[in-house]
Amino acid sequence: MNKIENLSFDEERALYNLKDTEVINCNFAGEKDGESVLKEARNIVVKDCNFSLRYPLWHNKKFVLENSKLDELSRAPIWYSIDGYIKNSNINSIKCLRECKNIKIEDSNIISQEFGWKCEDIILSHSNIESEYFMLDSKNVKLESVNFKGKYSFQYIKNLDISNCNLDTKDAFWHSENITVRNSTIKGEYLGWFSKNLTLIDCKIIGTQPLCYCENLKLINCVMEDTDLSFEYSSVEADIKGYIKSVKNVKSGFVIADEIGEIINEDSIMPVEAEIKIRK
């Protein structure tokens, strides 16, 4: 591969359509404030670089971004790109990843509102992420050992696999389809409303009014904390360890727990026929 090292760039499309090149220890910032510095690149490796310009990595194909920093001035940094690998990087720029495909991210720290919209085939591992509307309307996504914080995550997402994660999030998984979460903690209000085919295995669920209006919901060996008014109008199969604060108007299926503080069946707008059982 060719190499570009130890240089600074601030012009519009400074390295446009770059091919088969390593970009090492370069700085993308300056008075000219040029956009799209690495637009339409092909087969590039970017290492130890700093970005402070808008839209730096649009329409890339086959790229690596490693040990690099993208600050708040590098807004919307990676759009319409495919076959990317991001490692050991710090991203602090709004709207990172939009309509991207086949991107792997690991060992990175990300603060990015509206991260990962309308993406496909995304893997995130061993990373910390803060975002709102995280992964909106994306599909085929996998999270492993991720710490996530932010509201309105995973809405309208399809085909999501999560394991060994900590999620501090409100209104997560709304209108989602085909989700499996394993060995994870999910903290936040109004979890999973209107979801379809959501399965939680060996998880801890914390927060008010979770898992309402769900279709084909399954909880296997889970713990629920401060979860009042759970499962309203859901079709559910739930086997819960310990105590549930309250369940309300469960549409169908069953809920079994060691203890349930209150079972509420009132003012229902539809038949509620689920079996609610206390484990003996």
Image (cartoon, rainbow, N blue to C red):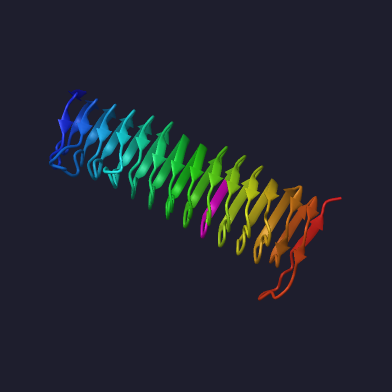
Residue at image location 47% in from the left, 57% down from the top? 156
Residue at image location 33% in from the left, 44% down from the top? 93
Instruction: Please state if 73 lies on the left or on the right of 119 as rendered.
Output: left
Q: Pick whichever, 78 or 147, lies toward us.
A: 147
Residue at image location 46% in from the left, 37% down from the top? 128
Q: Quadrant of residue 183?
A: top right
Q: Which residues are magenta?
A: 174-180
Residue 219 percent across, percent down from the top left: 67, 50
Residue 189 percent across, percent down from the top left: 58, 56
Can residue 176 be found in the magenta stretch? yes
Q: Is residue 39 shown above or below 3? A: below
Q: Quadrant of residue 66?
A: top left
Residue 43 percent across, percent down from the top left: 25, 32
Q: Pick whichever, 71 or 105, lies toward us.
A: 71
Q: Is residue 88 shown above or below 279? A: above
The N terminus: image quadrant: top left
Q: Pick whichever, 100 or 206, lies toward us.
A: 206
Instruction: Please state if 140 lies on the left or on the right of 188 as rendered.
Output: left
Q: What count of labels does the image hold? A: 0
Instruction: Please state if 133 lies on the left or on the right of 267 as rendered.
Output: left
Residue at image location 24% in from the left, 25% down from the top? 25
Can residue 252 be found in the magenta stretch? no
Q: Is residue 274 shown above or below 158? A: below
Q: Pick whichever, 29 or 191, lies toward us.
A: 29
Q: Residue furthest front?
A: 31
Instruction: Please state if 45 lies on the left or on the right of 176 as rendered.
Output: left
Q: Quadrant of residue 92?
A: top left
Residue 258 percent across, percent down from the top left: 80, 50
